[in-house]
Image (spheres, rainbow, N blue to C red):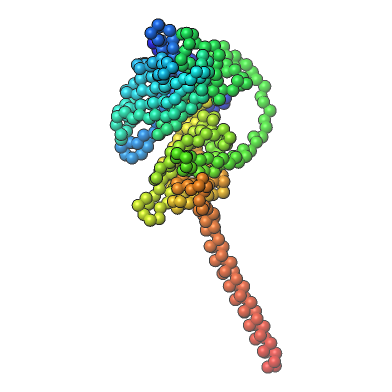
Amino acid sequence: MEARWWPRGPLRPPRCSACLLLLLGTAVFFQSYAVEVDVKDATNATCLYAQWLMRFLIKYETNSGDYKNATLSLPSNVTHDGSTCGNDTQAALLAVQFEEGHSWSVNFTKTNETYQADFITFTYNTNDSAVFRDAKRKGPITIVVKDTMHPVELNNVFVCHNTDSIEAENVTQFFWNITLQAFVQNGTIGKKESRCDADKPTSAPTILPTVANITTASTTTLSPAPTTAPKPVENPDTGNYSLKSGNKTCLLATVGLQLNVSQDKPLLININPKTTSVDGTCGNTTATLRLNDGNSRFIGFTFFVKNASANVRRFYLKEVNVTLLNHMNGSVILSADNNNFSKWDASLGSSYMCRKEQTLEINEDLQIHTFNLRIQPFLVKENKFSTAEDCSPEVDNFIVPIAVGAALGGLVVLVLMAYFFGHKKHRNAGYEQF
């Protein structure tokens, strides 16, 4: 078996100049290495071939009780022990190991006509202090997650250039520029490709930047484009999201989401519910809803139960995290989280509803605007929202001073009327005495 690693060449150009500046600013920190693994059988013929890039975003707890995000990228020096060819009865395995006790593997099974990835196993070691600074939990941590790869016809090569991701247990795995074939027949890599959903065959070919391209672009004089007033961004479409635990729905959410990014200049991004996939976890006292909008934007909402030992228990939104990637090369454009929220508070067993626009301040560079919100992260019954506790009392608080003002106004009117009639009666009485 051979495994070859090399630094990636020039990054593909992003679609906006702001993204390019961000990439240039983080090029050293987020440098990635591509791996090419060529697994051989007993006859020295290729039986499994893979070439890809990947990166991990890991959330961990520190000794102070705070949570931090760590980025783990593949270095130039890795090992590949344990990779196996597989056969009709045994799964093929692609495995790599790197740095201070980190490892990643995926197994493949096949039928008479197709092969597909089954499970991904990722182990990260928080003893790696260069990555996990001040980590509270020490030692290797392993997660296993079901791969979302569709079945691929035997002798076809699976190709996916765009970024894909899988989230589980505080870890987001990002993959891009994948070329893969398991159960290679007769030692020859297939010539027919099976593309992932994210790759659109009709998209224009990407031209890699070269010295000639850059020189031409910098010396060519272009006529200024006509200035047009920017179109206002409409409110986002409302999406319906749910999570299941077994056969039962355990979380329901209806919300329109809009990201307000202000790193370079204000940018409003509407999340399209039609392209958004849902993941997350349900529990007795915590629940997490994770959304992937299909355009390398990932949003997570974490809910907690407070007063867990009291008779009257309530839930609330405690944490929100957002990751924005460049969908062409997987580099992180923005990663932000806030775990100090106390929003969307409602009684356990009820849902929280707010039709008006609300704003969640993640950090100075990012806000999330929500529209037509209704959420129930616990105790969902019969796949339906329970009675809603509306945020309208926040608005209705103005009714009290208005009502008091109206009552005082009415009292003043009554006093004036009493004075007027009393004065008139007094004048009439004076005429009679005269």
- Residue farthest top in this picture: 43
Residue 245 visible (yes or no): yes
- In the image: residue 261, left or right of residue 281: right
Q: Quadrant of the C terminus?
A: bottom right
Which quadrant would residue 53 be assigned to in this image?
top left
Depth check, front residue: 126 or 259: 126
Q: Position of residue 272 (x, y in %)?
A: 58, 35
Q: Quadrant of the N terminus?
A: top left
Q: Is residue 268 above or below residue 386?
A: above
Q: Is residue 397 left or right of residue 418?
A: left
Residue drawn at (55%, 19%) of the image: 194
Quick check: 124 above or below 283?
above
Residue 207, horizontal then vertical, whole percent: 57, 16
Residue 15 at x, y percent in the picture: 57, 25
Q: Can the viewer see residue 359?
A: no
Q: Nearer the viewer, residue 431 or 407?
A: 407
Residue at left offset 40%, top offset 6%: 43
Along the viewing direction, whichever of 427 and 123 lies nearer the viewer: 123
Task: From the viewer's perspective, tell me whether residue 317 is left or right of residue 274.
Answer: left
Considering every residue shown, the one lying at the far bottom of the view is 433
Residue situated in front as seen by the camera: 334 or 276: 276
